[in-house]
Image (spheres, helix red, strand yellow):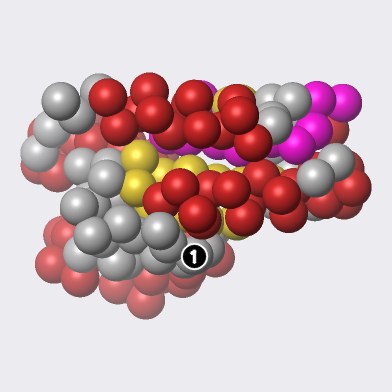
């Protein structure tokens, strides 16, 4: 969906900034907001570009740099940490060949940390583009990533 189409859906009010950023970023395969798009959004809402940038930089779910088609967010809060989150993260890094904060060469996956996903009773947990996975094990992670890789064939 184009940025223009998304902007036309919302009133020209700063109140809708986060909704616009979320909808637009999700609509893009590389899940980021460029400088040019920040300018367009700021003009549409009659706010400064620095206001848009401050929101993007405050919330970890937003990005100003291109990311993979699938963004894997691994919970790093206490319950997940105590329930083998480190093992899960190490497994993901080995499977994908990247570290936290990096994107695979084929631009398919980006690996990130996140705060609590609200699944503390089913830790460890991760989120991939809005889908939550819980009670993770190394084998479960391998199966999940294999499934996502298979979607590209």
Near-viewer residue (99 or 143): 143
Q: Kindly indicate the quadrant of the structure image that contains residue 139.
A: top right
Residue 39 appears in the picture as rendered: no
Residue at 53 percent across and 48 percent down: it is 92
Q: Is residue 147 left or right of residue 65?
A: right
Q: Could you classify mark 1 by the number of other residues whose Cα lies within 10 Å: few (under 14), some (14-19), or many (20 or more)?
A: some
- Residue 2 sits inside the magenta stretch: no
Total labels drawn: 1
Above or below residue 122? Residue 42 is below
123 left or right, relative to 22: right
Q: Residue at x 35, y 47 (%)?
A: 109
Q: Position of residue 46 (x, y in %)?
A: 27, 61
Q: Residue furthest bottom?
A: 50
Q: Is 61 drawn above or below residue 27 in the view shown?
A: below
Where's residue 14, x and y in %? Answer: 40, 52
> From the image, which quarter does the C terminus lie in?
top left
Visible in this render: residue 99?
yes
Residue 128 highlighted magenta (yes or no): yes
**For mark 1, what is the residue?**
99
Residue plotted at (37% across, 76% down)? 50
Please report the bounds of the magenta region as a residue range: 121-131
Residue 51: where, in percent of width, then height? 41, 69
Q: Is residue 121 left or right of residue 66?
A: right
* Camera-nearest residue between 77 and 106: 106
Quadrant into which the N terminus falls: top left
Residue 138, image quadrant: top right
* Residue closest to the eye, 60 or 98: 98
Q: Residue at x 38, y 23 (%)?
A: 147
Locate residue 2, reporting x and y percent: 10, 39
């Amino acid at each position: 969906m184009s940025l223009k189409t998304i902007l036309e859906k919302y009133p020209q009010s700063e109140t809708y900034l986060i909704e616009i950023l979320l909808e637009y970023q999700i609509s893009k395969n590389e899940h980021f907001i460029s400088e040019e798009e920040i300018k367009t959004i700021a003009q549409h809402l009659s706010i400064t570009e620095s206001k848009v940038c401050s929101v993007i930089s405050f919330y970890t779910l937003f990005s100003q740099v291109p990311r993979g088609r699938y963004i894997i967010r691994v919970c790093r809060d206490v319950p997940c940490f105590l329930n083998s989150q480190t093992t899960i993260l190490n497994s993901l890094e080995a499977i994908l060949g990247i570290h936290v904060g990096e994107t695979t060469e084929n631009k398919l996956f980006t690996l990130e940390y996140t705060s609590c996903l609200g699944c503390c009773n089913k830790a460890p947990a991760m989120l991939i583009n809005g889908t939550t996975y819980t009670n993770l094990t190394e084998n479960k992670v391998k199966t999940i990533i294999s499934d996502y890789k298979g979607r590209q064939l």
